[in-house]
Image (cartoon, helix red, strand yellow):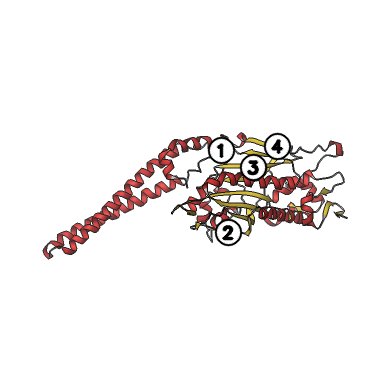
């Protein structure tokens, strides 16, 4: 939900945001017209109801001979009130249906356009040249199969396309990665939180995931619940309908969960391996902050994501995502993309989004400030997920078929320095 007062005062701001997103500019005028109609209908209903109440008191004190005529008039007024209430409800529904389609107002300065119009903010590390090592790099799936770490064939047999098993080294490597991410997040003040992976419609809707990407969400119709694609959703719902105390600083959580995505619209894309799958594990940062602190918190989350990439010894770049590639709730989003040698390009590993007050307004999450309440800002950011195994396996593969374990992950693997076809190698 956007700030309606700001929309009424400065509609051109929202029109510029819509234009940058490549979305409907006319929607802004439609919402304003619906808002005017709604407020007019509510006023007419409330005036009629007040008149009806006043008239009812007149009937109570009227002379006996005058009451039949007054009662008849009262019935007419009651019918009018019911009709105006129906008109008010209809106008309110029409307004809410329209305003729910309006995405968050973007932050000034982000790039306009679609997916390809991002701006590269920095590039860190140099992609590995495998020439001096004397071998052509294998892709992550071939490495994983040779090491007994990834099994997509049985994943497909049991659950269908885009499902997989992580076995042996693969399972241990993922757990090590997630535990490192949890520790880094906790060290930065994010409280570890294992979240539900099923949420009610109002929570999914409140976070903005039932907009244009609703077809990517799994729904359990019999229970009217949704499987989450990120723990951002249950973490956003954690303080729904609450007034928070942020005087001592942000509330920060590190969500740990399985995640589920239908990947609708991605037919034929990244079908090999575990880059784009229906189920994966993830550690997700989530913050509730005062509005004035939101951009600083966004930078802080991005720095933590870069720290994780550096700990995993991966070359990467940071991009400022273009407006047309933002989700409905994001006002700005940074992506960190790691180098994938066999694809010869960078692929997204993390995103961090500043959702300003968009989610908080929908979920009624406020703080008390100067004797009044106001919406808080919410932000989210990936710390690690299953996809990270792709660049870790590919960038750290060796000519003998082994994979070197990044230094930061070794304590989580009992001191393992590498995994080869013959088994693990440990520090001496």
Please identify the residue farthest to the bottom as the structure is shown: 64
Tell me, yes or no, whether the two marked residues, 2 and 4, touch with CB atoms within 8 Å: no
Q: Residues within 10 Å of mark 2 (few under 14, many from 20)?
A: many
Q: CA distance from mark 3 to mark 1?
A: 14 Å
Q: Position of residue 213 (x, y in %)?
A: 56, 46
Q: Is residue 279 left or right of residue 69?
A: right
Q: Quadrant of the C terminus?
A: bottom right
Q: CA distance from mark 4 to mark 1?
A: 23 Å
Tell me, yes or no, whether the two marked residues, 2 and 3, touch with CB atoms within 8 Å: no
Q: Secondary structure at mark 4?
A: strand
User: Is 152 in front, or is 411?
Assistant: 411
Q: Residue at x 24, y 57 (%)?
A: 52
Residue 335, label in figure:
3
Q: CA distance from mark 1 to mark 2?
A: 29 Å
Query: Between disc 3 and disc 4, whose residue precedes?
Result: 4
- Residue at the spot of label 4: 123
- Residue at the spot of label 1: 324
Q: Nearer the viewer, mark 3 or mark 4?
A: 4
- Residue at the spot of label 2: 198
Q: Quadrant of residue 53?
A: bottom left
Q: Secondary structure at mark 2?
A: strand
Q: Nearer the viewer, mark 2 or mark 3?
A: 3
Q: Nearer the viewer, mark 3 or mark 1?
A: 3
Q: Is residue 153 left or right of residue 74?
A: right
Q: Residues within 10 Å of mark 1 (few under 14, many from 20)?
A: many
Q: Position of residue 319 (x, y in %)?
A: 64, 38
């Amino acid at each position: 939900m956007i700030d309606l007062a700001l929309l009424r005062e400065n509609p051109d701001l929202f029109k510029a945001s819509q234009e940058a997103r490549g979305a409907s500019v006319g929607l802004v005028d439609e919402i304003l017209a619906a808002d005017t109609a709604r407020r007019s209908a509510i006023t007419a209903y409330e005036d009629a109801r007040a008149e009806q109440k006043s008239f009812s008191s007149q009937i109570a004190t009227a002379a006996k001979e005058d009451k039949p005529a007054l009662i008849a008039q009262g019935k007419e007024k009651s019918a009018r009130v019911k009709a105006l209430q129906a008109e008010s409800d209809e106008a309110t529904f029409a307004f809410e249906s329209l305003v729910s389609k309006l995405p968050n107002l973007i932050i000034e300065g982000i790039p306009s356009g679609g997916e390809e119009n991002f701006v590269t903010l920095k590039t860190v590390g140099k992609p590995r040249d495998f020439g001096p090592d004397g071998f052509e790099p294998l892709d992550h799936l071939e490495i994983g199969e040779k090491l007994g770490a990834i099994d997509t064939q049985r994943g497909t047999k049991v659950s269908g396309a885009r499902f997989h098993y992580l076995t042996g080294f693969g399972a241990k490597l993922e757990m090590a990665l997630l535990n490192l991410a949890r520790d880094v997040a906790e060290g930065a003040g994010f409280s570890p939180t294992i979240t539900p992976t099923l949420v009610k419609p109002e929570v999914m809707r409140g976070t903005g995931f039932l907009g244009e990407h609703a077809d990517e969400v799994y729904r359990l119709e019999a229970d009217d619940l949704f499987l989450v694609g990120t723990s951002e959703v249950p973490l956003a719902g954690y303080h729904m309908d609450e007034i928070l105390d942020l005087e001592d600083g942000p509330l920060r959580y590190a969500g740990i969960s399985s995640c589920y995505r239908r990947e609708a619209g991605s037919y034929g894309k990244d079908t090999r391996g575990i880059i784009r799958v229906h189920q994966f594990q993830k550690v997700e940062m989530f913050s509730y902050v005062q509005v004035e602190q939101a951009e600083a918190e966004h930078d802080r989350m991005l720095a933590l994501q870069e720290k994780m990439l550096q700990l995993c010894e991966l070359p990467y770049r940071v991009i400022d995502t273009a407006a047309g590639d933002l989700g409905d709730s994001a006002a700005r989003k940074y992506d960190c993309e790691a180098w994938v040698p066999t694809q010869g390009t960078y692929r997204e590993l993390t995103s961090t989004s500043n959702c300003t007050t968009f989610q908080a307004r929908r979920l009624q999450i406020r703080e008390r400030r100067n004797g009044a309440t106001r919406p808080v800002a919410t932000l989210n950011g990936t710390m690690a997920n299953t996809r990270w195994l792709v660049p870790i396996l590919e960038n750290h593969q060796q000519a003998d078929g082994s994979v070197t374990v990044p230094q930061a992950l070794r304590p989580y693997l009992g001191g393992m320095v590498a995994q080869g076809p013959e088994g693990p190698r440990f520090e001496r």
